[in-house]
Image (cartoon, rainbow, N blue to C red):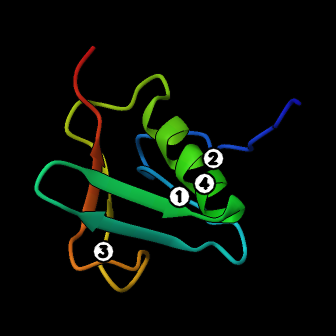
Amino acid sequence: MEQVISVPDYDPGVGLRFSWDDGFDITVSVTRSEVVVKANRAGLTSLARHLLTLAQEGVRGGMHVHLTADQEIESKVDLVFERIPD
């Protein structure tokens, strides 16, 4: 199966742009030894798009997507994906 995910182009003048698939559902839980991310298809595709957005040429180290608890994700903690320098 081939899945095509459209990723907004990175523009330094505009910054990072993220988009969500309709109906996304993402839950994050934390235990002593693991972080568990659960998501429906729309949520997984949205997360993949966010990671691909961060992976684009020109995105600087330190840039990130911050998913806020009880807003974008169902969780007691925020979830942050951050780009590190290559």
Local crowd size for mark 3, using a 10 Å CA cut-off: few (<14), some (14–19), many (≥20)? some
Distance of label 4 from label 3 (alpha carbons): 16 Å
Residue at image position (21%, 72%) is 77
Q: Which residue is mark 1?
A: 18
State the SS at label 2.
loop
Local crowd size for mark 2, using a 10 Å CA cut-off: few (<14), some (14–19), many (≥20)? some
Local crowd size for mark 1, using a 10 Å CA cut-off: few (<14), some (14–19), many (≥20)? some
Say whether disc 2 or disc 3 marks the residue closer to the N-terminus: 2
Q: Is residue 39 left or right of residue 35?
A: right
Say whether disc 4 or disc 1 marks the residue closer to the N-terminus: 1
If the image is split into quadrants, where does the C terminus sit? Answer: top left
List x then y, in percent, for residue 69: 29, 78
Q: Amino acid at mark 2?
A: Pro
Q: Which residue is mark 4?
A: 44
List x then y, in percent, for residue 46: 60, 56
Local crowd size for mark 4, using a 10 Å CA cut-off: few (<14), some (14–19), many (≥20)? some
Mark 2 near mark 1, Cβ–Cβ under 8 Å? Answer: yes
Of badges 2 and 3, the one in the foreground is 3
Q: Amino acid at mark 1?
A: Phe
Q: Which residue is mark 3?
A: 68
Residue at image position (86%, 30%) is 2
Residue at image position (39%, 84%) is 71
Mark 2 near mark 3, Cβ–Cβ under 8 Å? Answer: no
Q: Is residue 21 left or right of residue 26?
A: right
Of badges 4 and 1, the one in the foreground is 4
* Residue in the foreground of this view, choosing between 83 and 74: 74
Q: Which quadrant of the structure image shows residue 44?
A: bottom right
Q: Residue furthest front?
A: 32
Mark 3 near mark 1, Cβ–Cβ under 8 Å? Answer: no
Which disc number belongs to residue 71? none
